[in-house]
Amino acid sequence: MVERVPIKGADGSAARPGETGTALELLVHGVGGTTPEKMLDDPRTVRITGDDIAAVFRRADDVDAEKRQRDGRTGPVPEAYVWCNLTSGNGTRALWLLLLPFMVVNLAHWMRPTARDRTRTVRLYGLLVRLTGLTLTVLLVAAACEVALDLAAWQCAGTRACAESHSWLGFLSPDVSDDGWWSRPGRRLALAALVPAALTCLLWYLSHRTWSAYESQQPMSRAGEPEEDNGRTALGRPGFWYGRRLVARLRAAHTAAGLLTIAAAVSSTAARFDREPGGPALLDTLGRLLEAGLVTAGVAVVWVVCRRGRSEKYLDRQLDKHLVRRLPLAGLALLAVAAVYAGWERPGWQSYGRLSGDATFGGIALVQGLLVVALAVVAHLLYRTHPDPRAALRGLAGPAVATLACALGGVMSGGVSQRVADWLDGTGATILGPPVLLTWQASVIPLVLLVLLVHFAWLGRRTWRSVRAQLGTVESEYPAEPKDAARTRRIARTRAMAALTDRGPRLLGVTSASTLLLGAGALVGALTSRKTPAKATEGAYVFVQGAADTAQALGSWLIGLGFILFVTWGRRAYKDPSARRTIGILWDVGTFWPRAAHPFAPPCYAERAVPDLTWRIATWTRATGGRLVISGHSQGSVLAAAAAWQLEPSVRARVALLTYGSPLERLYGRWFPAHFGPAALTALHHDVDCWRNLYRLTDPIGGPVRLPGDCGPEVDREPLKDPLAYGRTELHPLPAPILGHSDYQADPVFAEERARLLGRLQPDVPGPRTQDDSGRSSA
């Protein structure tokens, strides 16, 4: 690949098209990424602007196409915007797997239903999601405390047999080390606190590093024009893609929450010992003061999370510097005080049993359940104000996804605790193991999977019936071809499998409902019995006891298998670029949205990509006055639409939009109706000069835009044929493949629709811009 500096005009802007009538096609690829050579169909490409993370490329022969004739070439000048490195860069991206629950809960923030004149209810919805995200941070740090403080430092190091089998714990064991200095219970806890503290610092570092690279990319500053109406979608607001202030504030609050969780885990057991009759009065007083400090800091954290959401109506360049710095430092100071307090000499203090893990995890689960129920009530109220029949789960997609995020956090916490407990004491003869609540939660996993298997069986039956119904339709679309039963069945099966995407809301609803109900049952069972399911059912009917034993054993095995697969996948992604690219596809879909609910979620690549596209479109049209088509495939069509919304109305009206394999309505319109609903997409159709959308029935991702009224046929073309030929023809002597979601440019309709869009754009361009002596531009 050759790199050259693009040819510019005298004023530093790109050269003008002059009399050549040059048009520009800005190509934006979809999920998974590609290379500029493939996008431009030329081995010689030139990066004309951008960096190694995201850049715009042209063919080497088209670098100065605005200034000269293109050697007989016709059609627009193609440019490729390549953004795949935003989500699948170096090996450290494998660490993002740790952030999966945070990413999912962040999606719930953006899934609220469309609402009008319900500002306070919308704010309450965002507040509940942010609080749910805060509980996930506390849950993850509490799981790390369970592993390091409870299982390793408290139980294993406090038991001679377990400590002897793990020599690296010998200096913490009072029996093995002959009552060494570090063998005191409080000092063991203080030393073990370094593990969850390191995890919290890692999360802070990842968030701060990505914040500097993504949220700090300032969009194009613009003033709203009189005819501009941002009420239709928030994506057109000037500050939508600039969440620098909110993420910094939330990062400080979540970091402090993690440190406070560790401090509470370290000091709570020592405080209970000091309150016993005959305990040291001075330490008892210090413990109460420390608890008061922890409660005060916790209230401050919750207040920061609740105080304010996003500022989207303007570019909020301010930072709450004192808050961002002092809140984590206060949490760190309290953790240091808690470590000193717990490590103080206490004669007669010995470790036995478990730490207060059941109460901690039980409280977190209860709070999460209440928040999810409250979120569902608020979402229903919002949906009733402006019902949308296409909205997923009738507006309850956000609460369902929040439930899924909490379940993922619970599975990850339980999986880590169970595997570490088995590693420290696989026989269960020396230590008690993790809290019984985690065992109960693992035991309901087989029941959830059973419900899902039943639902998958129902989906399989519906798909089989759909295949049979499609056979006649497929044959009628190729009337002049000799019929091949296997070929027909393959096409029909591809269409039926592609239609399963539309069943996603039902699958999510079944998963979240069963998870919520069974999780509530696990919480009640753990808190009432304080025993594992197998022990709690001793003496019951044989069937009940056998079912409990089976569920507990199978759940432990499944959660262990899930943890092993998780670690294996992360390790493979760290070393293998192709596996990392697969994970990048997941992030392409999940990290389009800004971090509004959780600062430790993977960063929003659109906060870099959308300003990139907006700057490129605005500067090119302003400098040249030429015609421009934004050509977006798959997720690239979502970026193209977001960039069009960010343009000034006068610029937006001078560009055309060509989307293909687009999930704009099929996925984003259904799952995020407040931002991609019918009103927003209809407004986009009216704002741009023209818009055409191409899709196939065999595409599992792309679909029609489904605009109401006469707008629908103006945007959506009838489904493209796939395959292009049923059998062998003169144009296709070999069997044509079923393309599905890929290679839309191979269809002749693509070039036809692109030419139509260019023909509809105004060919007249404004006069050349010049600069007077004062440096101001004039036409």
Image (cartoon, helix red, strand yellow):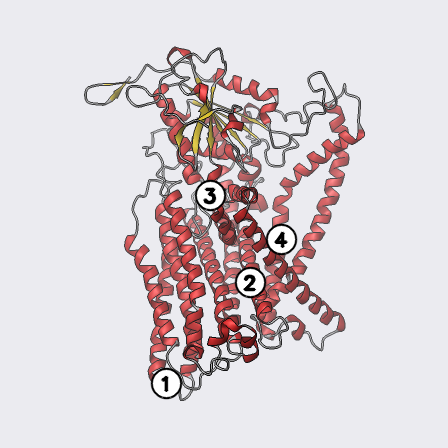
In the image, which is nearer the foreground, mark 3 or mark 1?
1
Which residue corresponds to the image point at 72% horizontal and 67% vertical from the top-left? 547
Residue highlighted by disc 3: 593
Residue 580: x %, y % from top left: 54, 44
Residue highlighted by disc 4: 511
Tag 2: Cα neighbours inside 10 Å, few (<14), some, or many (≥20)?
Answer: many
Task: Identify the amino acid type marked 2.
Answer: Val
N-terminal of the pair, mark 3 or mark 2, is 2
190 lies above or below 689: below
Tag 4: Cα neighbours inside 10 Å, few (<14), some, or many (≥20)?
Answer: many
Q: Name the disc covering residue 230, or none.
A: none
Task: Identify the amino acid type marked 1.
Answer: Pro
N-terminal of the pair, mark 2 or mark 4, is 2
N-terminal of the pair, mark 2 or mark 1, is 1
Tag 1: Cα neighbours inside 10 Å, few (<14), some, or many (≥20)?
Answer: some
N-terminal of the pair, mark 3 or mark 4, is 4
Q: Name the disc covering residue 416, or none.
A: 2
755 lies above or below 126: above
- How far apart marks 3 and 2 lie (CA) works out to 29 Å
Question: In what element is the residue under mark 1?
Answer: loop
Residue 402: x %, y % from top left: 53, 53
Residue highlighted by disc 1: 280
In the image, which is nearer the foreground, mark 4 or mark 1?
1
Task: Identify the amino acid type marked 4.
Answer: Thr
The reply to whether discs 2 and 1 touch (Cβ–Cβ < 8 Å) is no
Residue 587 appears in the picture as rendered: yes
Task: Identify the amino acid type marked 3.
Answer: Trp
In the image, which is nearer the foreground, mark 2 or mark 1?
2
- How far apart marks 4 and 1 lie (CA) works out to 51 Å
Residue pushed farthest bottom? 278
In the image, which is nearer the foreground, mark 3 or mark 4?
3
- How far apart marks 3 and 1 lie (CA) works out to 53 Å
